[in-house]
């Protein structure tokens, strides 16, 4: 679609979604009424600014089904977030929602060359998490043969990769990295594998980590984006040129705002991503604050697609680390370490507080345990990492180098941050 035609479709669907929310969700009826917003008052896409934001807290406050717009007899799937910081955020899908979801996922898979001759191994955990089933149905829609192995039992995963001639791998980036390590330890070489494409998501992946995964498995690695509150995977995804994640703009309307002020930022500026669902029936969301920091580009891609492209998420405004007044994103640290020879992509960030001052320790695995026998070499590597981190972050972080395989591996989303700042000072 041309930008003009696409925006006309978005406006039509936005008006419908506002009216739908007004008619079917008491929470939105009150919030929109209090704000003086009706569907008739939405004359242009810029009028979306008059709609109040929706947050994850709003969904949790109406746990479990309070924000559902469709009656339960029309809900045919229920998913939920992990609920690691409280009760899970629960989302429901109508049959139309599932149709659109699989279509959006099929698009992003096709955009990187997945086709009906591929065998796709899904190493996400199945269950309430949206990632596995989201990719599953989208890949089946393309005609792929899907192996729903789920996560865990990594040695078996590696065996299946080889024996079943898997060509597409779906997992978190950190688990793909771990899987490649295990496969090589088992004596499985890349020449014995048929892997060609990796569809990675659920956590951030820097270019440096991507390069290590591609080298480790000999595949073409791609990113996709989504979250359970909006749909799951399929909100956006890379094409073969990997110059941004193509947004499914006919189903989702994106904005970029200033996280502190809530002000909508001009096109091309970096800020917090806000998304309005345009076609959701089960649990429609108006101006949902994702907390993800990114930038959106609106010029057409050289692949020919005209939908906007979002840059890879730099970090989240709510897991951004503020150390001695400096904003620090884990992705910055990962990028530095991934470009230092002798250091692995496995790390932990430990936050402590002493005398009311915050301190950051970066624990990093080395790749060769024999280095532990040479204090001089180890200290040189530690100082290199420390100096480069200080240059990028603007603050001094304590760097601790540890032996290979000593930092915990995760089959799902890696937990990198250990925050001890609220513990009693020794």
Image: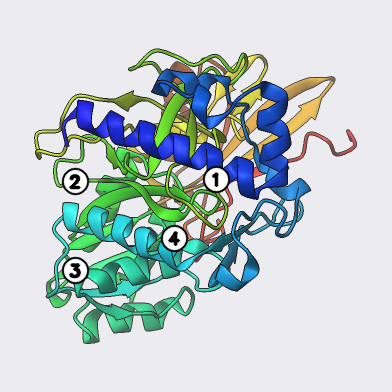
Q: Are marks 1 and 2 in contact (CB under 8 Å)?
A: no
Q: Are marks 3 and 1 in contact (CB under 8 Å)?
A: no
Examine the rendered structure and indicate whether residue 62 appears above or below residue 136.
Answer: above
Circle 1 residue: 20
Q: Nearer the viewer, mark 2 or mark 4?
A: 4
User: Which residue does the image show at 49% across and 41% down from the upper left?
Assistant: 17
Q: Can residue 341 be seen in the rendering of this structure?
A: no
**To which quarter of the image does residue 135 belong?**
bottom left
Name the secondary structure under disc 3: loop
Circle 3 residue: 195
Q: Horizontal and vertical percent for residue 73? A: 61, 73
- Label 2 vs 3, first from the N-terminus: 3
- Label 2 vs 4, first from the N-terminus: 4
Question: In whole angstroms, how far apart are the C-alphas of marks 2 and 4?
Answer: 24 Å
Q: Horizontal and vertical percent for residue 353? A: 78, 28
Q: Is residue 222 left or right of residue 393?
A: left
Q: Can residue 270 be seen in the rendering of this structure?
A: yes
Circle 2 residue: 239
Q: Residues within 10 Å of mark 3 (few under 14, many from 20)?
A: many
Circle 4 residue: 97
Q: Nearer the viewer, mark 3 or mark 1?
A: 1
Name the secondary structure under disc 1: helix
């Amino acid at each position: 679609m041309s930008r003009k035609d696409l925006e006309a479709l978005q406006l039509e669907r936005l008006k419908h979604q506002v009216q739908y929310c007004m008619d079917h969700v008491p929470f939105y009826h009150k919030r929109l009424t209090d704000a003086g917003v009706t569907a008739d008052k939405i004359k242009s896409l810029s009028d979306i600014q008059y709609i109040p934001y929706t947050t994850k807290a709003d969904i949790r406050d109406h746990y479990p089904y309070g924000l559902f717009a469709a009656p339960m007899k029309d809900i045919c799937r229920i998913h939920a977030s992990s609920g690691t910081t409280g009760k899970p955020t629960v989302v429901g899908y109508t049959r139309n929602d599932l149709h659109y979801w699989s279509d959006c996922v099929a698009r992003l898979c096709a955009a990187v060359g997945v086709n009906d001759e591929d065998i796709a191994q899904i190493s996400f955990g199945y269950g309430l998490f949206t990632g596995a089933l989201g990719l599953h149905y989208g890949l089946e829609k393309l005609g792929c043969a899907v192996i729903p192995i789920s996560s865990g039992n990594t040695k078996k995963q590696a065996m299946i990769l080889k024996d079943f001639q898997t060509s597409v791998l779906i997992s978190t980036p950190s688990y793909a990295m771990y899987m490649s390590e295990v496969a090589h330890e088992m004596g499985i070489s890349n020449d014995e594998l048929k892997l060609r494409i990796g569809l990675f998501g659920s956590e951030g992946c820097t270019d440096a980590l991507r390069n290590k995964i591609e080298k480790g498995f000999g595949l073409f690695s791609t990113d996709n984006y989504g979250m359970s509150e909006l749909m799951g995977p399929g909100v956006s995804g890379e094409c073969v040129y990997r110059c941004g994640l193509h947004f499914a703009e006919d189903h989702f309307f994106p904005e970029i705002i200033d996280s502190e002020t809530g002000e909508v930022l001009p096109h091309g500026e970096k800020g917090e991503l806000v998304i309005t669902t345009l076609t959701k029936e089960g649990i429609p969301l108006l101006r949902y604050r994702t907390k993800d920091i990114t930038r959106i580009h609106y010029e057409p891609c050289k692949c020919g697609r005209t939908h906007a492209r979002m840059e890879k998420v730099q970090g989240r405004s709510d897991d951004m680390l503020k150390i001695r007044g400096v904003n620090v994103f884990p992705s910055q640290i990962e990028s530095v370490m991934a470009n230092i020879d002798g250091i692995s992509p496995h790390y932990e960030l430990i936050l402590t507080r002493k005398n009311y001052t915050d301190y950051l320790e970066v624990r990093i695995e080395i790749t060769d345990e024999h280095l532990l026998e040479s204090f001089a070499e180890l200290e040189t590597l530690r100082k290199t990492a420390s100096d480069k981190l200080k240059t990028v972050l603007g603050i001094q972080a304590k760097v601790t180098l540890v032996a290979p395989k000593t930092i915990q591996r995760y089959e799902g989303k890696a937990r990198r941050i250990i925050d001890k700042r609220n513990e009693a000072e020794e």
